[in-house]
Image (cartoon, rainbow, N blue to C red):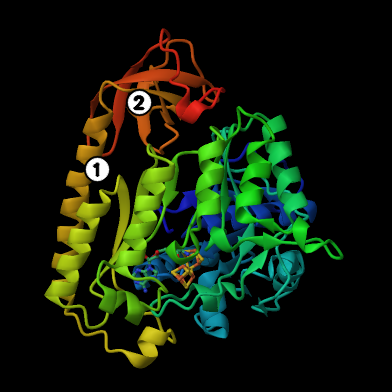
Amino acid sequence: MEKTNNYTRFRIPAADEQGKRLYIETYGCQMNVNDSEVVAAIMQQAGFTITGEMAEADVIFVNTCSVRDNAEQRVWGRLAIFRLLKQQRPGLVVGVLGCMAERLKEALLENGTVDIVAGPDAYRALPKLVREAESGQRGINTLLSHEETYADISPVRMDRNGVTAFVSIMRGCNNVCAYCVVPYTRGAERSRPSRTIIREVQTLFKNGYREVTLLGQNVNSYCWKEAGAPDSETVTFARLLEMVALLDPSLRVRFSTSHPKDMHNDVLYTMAMYPNICNHIHLPVQSGSNRMLEKMNRGYSRERYLERIAKIREIIPECSLSTDLIAGFCGETDDDHAQTLSLMRVAGYDAAFMFQYSERPNTKAARHFADDVPEGVKNQRLNEIIALQNRLSLESNRRDVQKTFTVLAEGDSKRSEAFLFGRTSHNKVVVFPKAGHKAGDYVSVRITECSSATLIGVEDAKTVYPPSRGKPVLF
Ligand code: SAH
Ligand code: SF4
Ligand code: F3S
């Protein structure tokens, strides 16, 4: 679910003069973005002021990702810059947080730039680690926990638009996909108490937010039961989705990521029942070849995956689908690759995140399989996958031209302040003339043209929303 090559630099109001200033840079997935918001809350409580300007910071945290080698290389590049800064400002404290901290531990302290290393379950210790670093003592805490969910902490929202927010509902991962480092960097799966999730979403809604994305490595295995409660009160993911959807019909709900082996019909029926649960499922397939899927330890076959897609289409006909794909996993042949391409065509994905396999130390794949697909072949296969997806995305967008969608406006379009951008329920980006609307408004937009990445449209105030699946409200 790593969605971006760019790091997230938080834009924060002017720093107040009193507290020490903390600058946070974030790499990796949406969960890391949300973790940085938790870190900001912990540090603010300890008297720090968050700044968006690295140049004025007393403390720099870089929240890191280890999912592929290039994610780590980017952070090493940043550390080289922080080293120069430290030469100019000797009191500056540099902390490495997140997945790289957990994976590399003490090794990060060795190059002399880093003062603090804190793994994903150690963020409550950060104020203490900073104090120790200021007194010249380098600190490390990479203990993983079976309980920590930061459930009681209200993240400091740094997601800029005030309309959409991420809410973590669980941490860690219990799957052992052979290529993946996440279970080692994030530890065991644990669900957050549902009441704390509901409370957080209620507060967001009160503060003007109109869309939440419930986050976890495998949200479909979310499960929470209060101590002493009967089994009948167990909150499954389907139940949680319903609880959040019921908070207000004008609050949209998304979720990510769903593991195909755990995507059961109860979630699909819940989606079909509530118009404010968005019609989009991110269902990473990774490969279209049964041989690769088995070697990856994904727990489903090509046939089972396609059966899930057929069920999605049956229960939620207008649902959009996106996926993650890995090109060039260990032992992948031309035939395996051809099966990935053919599965993409059958699934007709609306969007995809596509990666070249990157061996991660100590994973099952690194220990047992040779990383034997030559770099050039991996690259070529990835390019073929990207080219096919571009075609599929364009076809998907073309099918939407002349249709009308309810778009939740998120902010000014990058191209012009006279335009807003927002997303449809099925997660497509739409650009349309502002015409008096603002971020947070729901606008009915008729699509007039498109590229493979964006829909362009005009407001269609006359449209009566098709009562989608017989559901009466806004969507
Ligand atoms: N929990 C999510 C994904 C987490 S990682 C899930 O299971 O779907 C996000 C994506 O990164 C994965 O879906 C996979 O496509 C990709 N990825 C993970 N490890 C990788 C590796 N070693 N090399 C290349 N891509 C990888
Ligand atoms: Fe990694 Fe698999 Fe867990 Fe996703 S489900 S985080 S790919 S181990
Ligand atoms: Fe996320 Fe990267 Fe860690 S994808 S869980 S920050 S390894």
CA gap, disc 1 and disc 2: 17 Å
Looking at the image, residue 272 sits to the left or right of residue 141; the answer is left
Vertical arrangement, residue 47 with respect to residue 131, above or below: above
Vertical arrangement, residue 192 with respect to residue 173, above or below: above
Please identify the residue farthest to the right as the structure is shown: 228
Q: Give residue 168's position: percent from left, percent from top.
A: 62, 54
What SS does tag 2 mark?
strand
Q: Residues within 10 Å of mark 2 (few under 14, many from 20)?
A: many
At 57% across and 72% down in the image, what residue appears? 186
Q: Give residue 32's position: percent from left, percent from top.
A: 54, 59
Task: Identify which amino acid the numbered label 1 is placed on.
Answer: Ser
Question: Which quadrant of the figure shows ligand 1?
Answer: bottom left
Q: Are marks 1 and 2 in contact (CB under 8 Å)?
A: no
At 57% across and 84% down in the image, what residue appears? 106
The quadrant holding residue 298 is bottom left
Q: Does the image show residue 379?
A: no
At 20% across and 53% down in the image, what residue appears? 345
Q: Quadrant of the N terminus?
A: bottom left
The quadrant holding residue 386 is bottom left
The residue singled out by tag 1 in the image is: 393
Looking at the image, residue 274 sits to the left or right of residue 152; the answer is left
Q: Is mark 2 within 8 Å of ligand 1?
A: no
Vertical arrangement, residue 159 with respect to residue 263, above or below: above
Looking at the image, residue 386 sits to the left or right of residue 17; the answer is left
Q: Does the image show residue 402?
A: yes
